[in-house]
Every structure is written in C-alpha cells, then in structure tokens.
Amino acid sequence: MPSVPGASTVDDMAWITRPARWSTGPAYVVDALVAIALLGLLVSDLLAGREPGAEPTTLLAFVSAAAMSLPYAAHRLRPAAALAVTCAAVVVYSLGHYAGYPGYALFVMVFGLALHGHHGNALFSSRSFLYFLTSLVTLSLALAVQPPELVDLSTWVSSLLVLAVAWLAGENLRARHDRWTQLEERTRRLEAEREERARQAVDAERMRIARELHDVVAHSMSLIAVQAGVANHVIDTRPNVAREALGAIETTSRSALVEMRRMLGVLRQPDEGEESAALQPCYCLNDLEAVVRQMAASGLQVEMTISGEPDAVPQAVSLSAYRIAQEALTNVLKHGGGSAQLDIRCGDDTVVVEVRDPGAGSVIRERADGSGHGLIGMRERVAVFGGQLQAGPDGRGGFRVAARLPYAEEGASVSGASSGASR
C-alpha cells in the first residue's frame, strides 16, 4: 500500500462548487468523469505491481475498485446508497490486502457528500456529519485489517486527517455557495421590488400628468368654446361684444399655453443656468378669484365665499382644492345654468370645497354616474389626502359637488410629498 496522498487531493476538487440534480447535464458529466478518474487511479495502482506484504491482484480487486469509485457518479441522487456501496467495497478491498490504496474513494466521496448532500443555514448538518463518521469508521477498519508491512502510525494519522480535511472543505464550500445563492436571490428580489416601485411611480406620474392636462385643457377649452360661440353669434350685430369675446379667447389660450409649458417643463431636466420650472409658483386657493373673473367673462356669474385662513393650507392641498373648484365651475359653465355658488371653508385641519348649481342644469352632466373624466380627476385628488367627495342632486332642483380634504399634522409629510408631485 503506497503512502497517503497530501491535502492537494481535496484542493483539486474544490472547483466543484454548485449543487445540482442528477438530471443536470454538466453536473452529471463532472461526477461521471471524477468517478472514472478514481477508477483509473486505483487500477493503475493495482497494475503497478506487488508491494511487500500485499496479495496478488485478482479479479475481485478490480471489481472492488470499480465498486469503490463508480458510486460517486450517483452521490447527488442517492447519497446514502452511494456511500454504503463505497464503504462496503473499501472493506472488501482491504480484506484482500491488495496493493492499491482504498482511501482515495472515501476522500472524494466525503467531500462530494458534504458539498452536495444538504443545503441550509447551518454550517454542519447532522446527515453530513453522519456520513463523515461512517467514512471514518470504515477507513479505520480498512487500515486495521492491513498487515504491518503496509500500514504504520503515520499512515493512520495522515489518512484520518485527509478525510477530516475533505469533509471540512466540502462543508465550507457548500456554506459559501449557499450564502452566495441567498445573496443572489435577495438581489433579484430587491431588483424586482425596485422595478415594481419604479413602474408604480411612472404610472402615478402618468396619472398626475393626465389629470393636470385635463384640468388645464378642459377649463381653458370650455372658456374658449363659450366665448367663440358668443363671438360667432353676435359678430354681425354687436361687433364690440364679439371683439371682447375674441380678446377673452386670446387671453385664455395664452394662459393655457403658459400653464402647459410650466407643467411640461417639470418633466425635463433643466439646463445649467436655466430656471427650473419646479421653482415657479403653483396655483392655490387665492387664485380662485381669477377663475371667477374668467367665468364672469364667459357668462357664468359665480358667488364665492371663503372662510378661514387659506394661506395656512398646505400647498398640495391648496392646489388640489383649486383644481376641484375650477373643474366643478367649468362643468357648470358647460352644462349648468347661468350662475353658481362657490363656498371654500378652511379649518384647522380640513378644507371643504362646495360648488352648487342652483339651476336646472347639472354641475357634472357629462357622466352623472360618477365615471366622467371630471369626477375621476376630482376623486383622485381627494383620495390622495384620504378625503371624501360627494356629487349629486341637492334635492332642490340643482346639483352639488362637495369635496373634503383633510391635512392633519401627522399627514404633513404626505402633504409635503404630494406637493412635489403636484407641481
């Protein structure tokens, strides 16, 4: 029996690091090649010739060598069975006192079982440790039955040390592989979450842009349509009135263009030295007077009352209240009577916007079931702050829209975040 190989035998196997099933092609090929290499190593030892104290090589020696080596090809699929066959073959081989060293097969088998036998957070599993103890007992028995000419104390110590090193190396590589697998899975999960958050942010931004465009275009185009109708109707009989209507159209269209440029400017990165569109002022409750004047110029008389302190309302809430009032008044102009009542109540933590159409018309006639674009935009703005929106007949032949926008102190951070998104 030749001297025991050094620890380099285990190091040569350290590149086999990823666990795989029997059906995985590359892993199957690697295991089969390792098994064939082990068999070739044992056969070469047997064919090298007799050593002092060794018995002549027989057919049983080659069969035992094959039984020790080839089970490694199936150690991923049937680890316990593969180890049992290898251990039994090592004992039979050792009892024949043949020249080839049987420890090679056990070293590689223990390494493979530790590397591929289990997966989890624990460094050492009970099953892997049982495989190691079984191999340790088998190797000790194989060495004990050898004649003194083949085995000495150094052979014992080096054999058991190499077996322990093979087991520890497999466990260490397996633990490292599992940690990397967990890190890769966590990275994939975080990347998926990041992409999902980005997608939700894009969807929210699209909805915000669509809502702002609807508010700007619907209000301005409604005023333009009404004024154009007036101008067309009186251009021959009352040219002064038609001229005023055309002037209102010009003013409204210019204002709409400015607002759209301001809003779209937020979407692009400003050049160095260019004033950021985000720094331009947003609309607020105090700007409703200009809306009322526009409505009056278009033929809708609005009675507006504001109570409380509108300047104390957070910017995001004030902008949403402004847009809700603007949309409701625009729909009165398009579908309602000739007058409307606008009531703004600013409390300590709530803003209430109420628009009444006292006539026979409907403030939101476009879709009275609540699915029109105007009501959708209103409900979205109210939902951002956890408020409430009511729209329907007021029981007196008219129509009423009432929106309640809370902004409690604990929601200040939400309001601040919404402010940036509402510019």
Image (cartoon, rainbow, N blue to C red):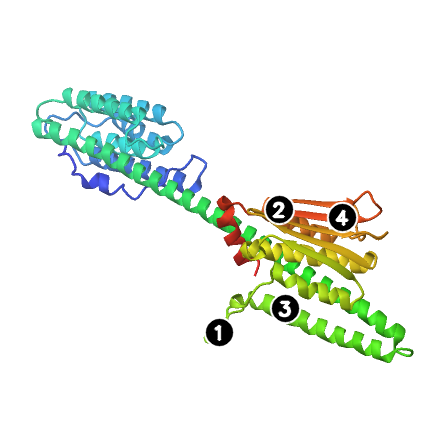
Residue identifier under label 3: 259
- Which residue matches tag 1? 271
Q: Quadrant of residue 177?
A: top left
Structural distance between the alpha carbons of marks 4 and 1:
46 Å
The amino acid type found where label 2 is placed reads: Ala
Query: Which secondary structure lies at badge 1?
Result: loop
Distance from disc 3 to disc 1, alpha carbons, whole Å, reads: 20 Å
* Sequence-first disc among 3 and 1: 3
Which secondary structure, mark 4? strand
Choose the circle earlier in sequence order: 1 or 2. Answer: 1
Pair 4/3: label in front: 4
Look at discs 3 and 1 and give the one toward the viewer: 3
Q: Nearer the viewer, residue 179 or 189?
A: 189
Say which amino acid is labelled 4.
Arg
Residue type at the position of mark 1: Asp
Mark 4 or mark 3: name the one nearer the start of the chain: 3
Separation (CA) of disc 3 from disc 2: 24 Å
**For the residues carrying marks 1 and 2, which lies nearer the camera in this image?**
2
Left/right placement of residue 155 relative to residue 313 reads left
**Residue 256 picture location, percent across and down:** 68, 69
Residue position for label 2: 383
Residue 175 at x, y = what percent? 30, 37
In the rendered structure, which disc, 3 or 2, sits on the residue that comes first in sequence?
3
Q: Which residue is mark 4?
A: 400
The residue lying at 62 percent from left, 46 percent from top is 383
Q: Are marks 3 and 2 in contact (CB under 8 Å)?
A: no
The residue type indicated by label 3 comes to Glu
